[in-house]
Image: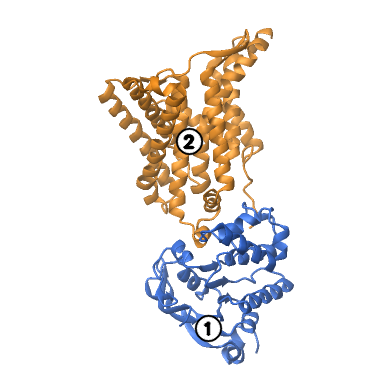
Chain colours: A blue, B orange
Amino acid sequence: MAVLELENVHAYYGMIHALKGVSLAVGEGEIVTLIGSNGAGKSTTLKAISGLVRPRDGRISLEGRPIGGLKAHEIAEKRVAHCPEGRKIFPRLSVRENLEMGAFVCRSTAEVKQSLEKVTELFPRLRERLGQKGGTLSGGEQQMLAIARALMMQPRILLLDEPSMGLAPVLVEQIFQIIQNLNRAGTTILLVEQNALQALQVAHRGYVIQTGNIVLADKAAHLRQNEMVRRVYLGES
Amino acid sequence: MREIAQMFPQVVVDGLTLGFVYALVALGYTMIYGVLEFINFAHSEVFMFGAFAGTEVLLALKASGLMATFTPVGSLFVSLLAGTVLTGLLGVVMEKIAYRPLRSAPRLVPLISAIGVSFFLQDAVRLVEGLWHNAFYVSAPTLFAGGWSPSPTVRIPTKSMILILVCLGIMLGLSLFVGRTKLGKALRAVAQDQATSSLMGINVDRIISLTFLIGAGLGGAAGTLFSLQYTLIHPYVGFILGIKAFTAAVFGGIGSIPGAMVGGVLLGVFEAFASAFLGPLTHGAFGAEYKDVFAFIILILVLIFKPSGLLGQSATEKA
């Protein structure tokens, strides 16, 4: 059974029909990427899953149970971690407090401590800065904090929205390396990216979204070879 | 000059007493602003409601003879608890009815709603008190008479000492709650980014209710303490005091909890100084009635040179 499944999901921003029947599935242990240009509906898809946008029609299910229409905090309780676009760390909370908020749904303090231990091992830079305010971190560090914060709840699935945005090329490499490592350690990931080249390199499967419709779905390796994908998203002639 | 030097310690005592009341009320403005970026203009009436709630409980204790068994400290505790909890609950209800439905409305709309809540509370209290006591001016019973005079020119009333101690205790408790507890951190997270907080599993509506519970509760505690200190209360007692406390919150940096504490205490002291010394210093050209002007001049100066207030964070922040 798929960890996450969307069937024919529609969503609106006011009058704008942003998702026009999106269907996709993410299996256990997979990295699935959703690629597309600006305004295609990538972020909206993630927001519909995590409850920030209420889907008007269609089915969203987590491990077979419907989660569509629940509030964002109720979906987070089910351990769906959404690492939003633009990082959105809490600038006036310390790094440690940011991470603690990521584990808000965890009831036991022992569990929180364990998660904190685990993610600071993954991101040693954060360990050195636990007492610092989130807003004082550099862009790359903030992105790491955002991912680390999402991992704190030990998610069933990690939704990553443009983790490479605004980062220097070296850091982009590093972030994708981290994503791959997380996945190897067992995290199921749905990755939204404009950087299609990198995304298709780490993902197992991919979907291409255009103006609210999924237009292509295939193995990542096949998408890399696809004529249209190469022309439009990989910038090859 | 000798006159001023002699009066000085007493003025400090009076200023601190008033300042701590301002500070407690300012905390309510600043907490709600911090989370919703909304000035709850009904907070002055929340304070007034607290004054009546605490006083009525005290009067009931007195009438039933329980005050004797409770001792003054016990009576203070009971009335303070009742004033705080009842007013806190009023805050929660107020948010649910008057503000929550307007959360996505333009900014001015909840402000107007707050003004409506203000009038409603003034008149509701006036009506109830009028029907009940046949008068809407109420005198709180005296709990702590006496005082302490370390020198012939200074007298520190016991009730002032108690007021200051209670305020310090409440502030310490609030700081620990907001700084150290999981809910307190969630409150700060919601103040920074509601959508992202909800992605963490934080129930934003519940945190907003909690903020109103605490903010209004602090106003209620301040009201109860105020009536014990200054005895006479009426349904309009919150108006000027509320504006002053709002000033104190802006002065300290709106949204900042330590700012509200510092701003409140400083404003109280400035005001006491102005009220006592403006006359002697200007040879009677300006009297004590200019104390409010003086307080607001200081506010304006601070805002010109440091618009974010004494302890407020600057508006620019690394994204």
Image quadrant in which you'd find residue A35: bottom right
Q: Share a chain, discs 1 and 2?
A: no
Residue drawn at x 68%, y 68% is: A122
Would you name the residue on which mark 1 appears?
Answer: A207
Looking at the picture, how far across and down is residue B39, in whole percent?
Answer: 48, 41
- Quadrant of the image for the C terminus of chain B? bottom right
Q: Is residue B223 above or below residue A153?
A: above
Q: Residue furthest front?
A: B69
Mark 1: which amino acid?
Answer: Tyr
Q: Residues within 10 Å of mark 1 (few under 14, many from 20)?
A: many
Cα distance between the residues tagged 1 and 2? 53 Å
Looking at the picture, how far across and down is residue B102, in whole percent?
Answer: 39, 50
Q: Which chain is disc 2 placed on?
A: B
- Left or right relative to B300: residue B131: left
Looking at the picture, how far across and down is residue B243, in whole percent?
Answer: 49, 31
Image quadrant in which you'd find residue A90: bottom right
- Left or right relative to A181: residue B221: left
Mark 2: which amino acid?
Answer: Leu
Name the front one of labels 1 and 2. Answer: 2
Is there any visible trace of residue B107 in the rendered image?
no
Closer-to-camera residue (B168/A222): B168
- Quadrant of the image for the N terminus of chain B? top right
Closer-to-camera residue (A121/B50): A121
Q: Which chain is disc 1 placed on?
A: A
Is there any visible trace of residue A183 in the rendered image?
yes
* Mark 2, secondary structure of its residue: helix
Q: Is residue A199 above or below residue A11?
A: below
Looking at the picture, how far across and down is residue A189, in whole percent?
Answer: 56, 76
Q: Is residue A182 above or below residue B128?
A: below
Would you name the residue on which mark 2 appears?
Answer: B218
* Mark 1, secondary structure of its residue: strand
